[in-house]
Amino acid sequence: MKICSIGAGYVGGPTMVVIAEQCPEIEVEVTDVNEERIAAWNSEKLPVFEPGLDEIVKKVRGKNLTFSTDIDEAIRTSDIIFLAVNTPTKTYGDGAGKASDLTYIESAVRRIAEVATGDKIIVEKSTLPVRTAEKIRRILATNRHGCNFEILSNPEFMAEGTAVEDLRHPDRILIGGDETESGQKAVQTLVDVYAHWVPREKILTQNVWSSELSKLASNAFLAQKISSINALSVLCEHSGADVDEIARSVGADSRIGPKFLKSSVGFGGSCFKKDVLNLIYLCEYAGLTEVARYWQQVIDMNEYQKHRFARFIREKLFGSLRNKKIAIFGFAFKKDTNDTRETPAITVCQDLLEEQAKLAIYDPKVPEETVRRDLRPYPADLITITQTPYEAAEEAHAIVILTEWDEFIALDYEKIFKNMQQPAFVFDGRNLLDLNRLRTIGFEAYGIGKPRA
Ligand code: NAD
Ligand code: UGA
């Protein structure tokens, strides 16, 4: 059997790498139109940073795993084709700012329709609006070789930073297929692939529409949990309650659960905002105004959280940031990834730059050019990228923690304090540090939803 993916990004890459690792007898090919990305997958420096990924790639690349830009050949020779292209929020026309842009999916599917000469199973791995399989089916029907295509929905639930662990030990694998005989046969084929390493009871099968919508629903629920705890963080700050204690007591109820209750400067990443917006769009399209409004609030709360954090920093720094050096610790949207898509750091930094603060930014994995690209068009002389957090904090008025990198916990804050402007502030947007310890050193230290000293 041969499997290929169209799309070698954060999902297509790691997903295929783990399939190749777990199914040595299956040939796996990862393809992309982006030559630079494929070259990076074939090099020593992979385009995606994920703990544990390098080791697996080294083990299977060149054996049953290859990376290539020859998409047509991969389509022709594969039995199963995973669509793992990006589905960003539309920026133009009807639905701009909310609906998913399906341009990339459509062009990948058109390519399959054009070049396939045999029967194939097409797997929706990208996150898609419910009923996309219908559109895919119509495009595939233009194939001139009379091929039979079965379309399955198999959304991905891995999170960045823990992709390898999530892919090796998923909570569940979801496969949606047609209830026809050939549809069910295709479902079984994909079940058999995952059954190489995933216990059978964790492989859920359902109809295509449920599977497509389950993915949007899952991300909406997760994002909603964060917005709920963040909404409470504001009340904590006004009442002396501690948001982490609230999360501990609320999360101890097994009906709620302890995960995804970490209050923060806001959620980031390429999917939560995009997928909730897509859900809102689908509701509006169906005329379900109240439902759309319900989910809109999840997004609004997140925007509020990011901006109110930046506003708080300005207020505490005596109302003026102009020419003040501020050290930014962390730029990625979460720890253990080099991804900055929709990172709250962009919004917070932009707000601080609007006030003409001078930012010294340190992140252990995000390259300088990415930070500079993300903060364009703010003047380059307001932004310095440093090689260490110590350098960033030198002579700064404040440290702002925007990513929960482990290395920030163990820094020598006594040393940092001595080299900062006084009074020296810490604004912990991830509730990573022990604020009382920082206060003992002399810092004015603030967290999200934390009692004020
Ligand atoms: P990405 O931007 O990192 O990768 C997508 C890749 O597809 C790019 O390399 C792009 O060049 C390629 N591509 C686009 N059109 C193509 C075409 N016609 N032919 C060949 N290659 C093409 O995106 P991603 O983060 O991997 O996300 C992909 C999908 O998976 C999205 O729908 C996303 O919502 C979903 N998803 C992402 C995550 C995540 O953690 N990033 C998790 C679950 C699901
Ligand atoms: C998220 C989901 O967790 C995955 O299941 C899903 O597959 C993926 O989106 C997707 O569809 O792309 P991801 O965005 O990679 O994964 O990372 P998360 O761990 O969910 O974190 C998202 C954001 O929420 C980060 O900025 C993180 O810091 C923040 N977060 C997370 C919190 O602020 N508090 C929490 O308790 C958890």
Image (cartoon, rainbow, N blue to C red):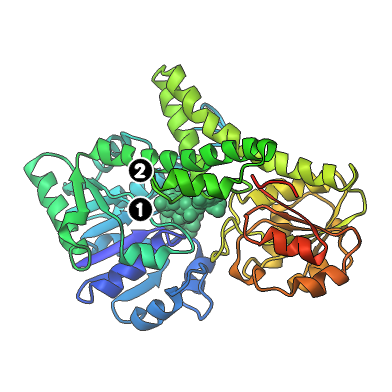
Q: Residue at x 60, y 49 (%)?
A: 264
| Neighbour tally class for label 1: few under 14, some 14-19, many 20 plus, Cα within 10 Å | many
Task: Out of 10 and 446, give the one closest to the viewer.
Answer: 446
Residue 220 location, x and y as percent?
43, 38
Residue 237 location, x and y as percent?
68, 40
Answer yes or no: is residue 288 visible. Answer: yes
Q: Looking at the image, is 355 positioned above or below residue 194?
A: above
Task: Out of 321 and 18, give the one closest to the viewer.
Answer: 321
Task: Out of 313 and 66, give the one closest to the viewer.
Answer: 313
Residue 436 location, x and y as percent?
71, 60
Task: Out of 419 and 188, give the one closest to the viewer.
Answer: 419
Q: Which mark is residue 156?
A: 1
Secondary structure beneath disc 2?
helix
* Distance in Å between CA atoms under marks 1 and 2: 8 Å
Q: Are marks 1 and 2 in contact (CB under 8 Å)?
A: yes
Answer yes or no: is residue 72 visible. Answer: no
Q: Quadrant of ligand 1?
A: bottom left
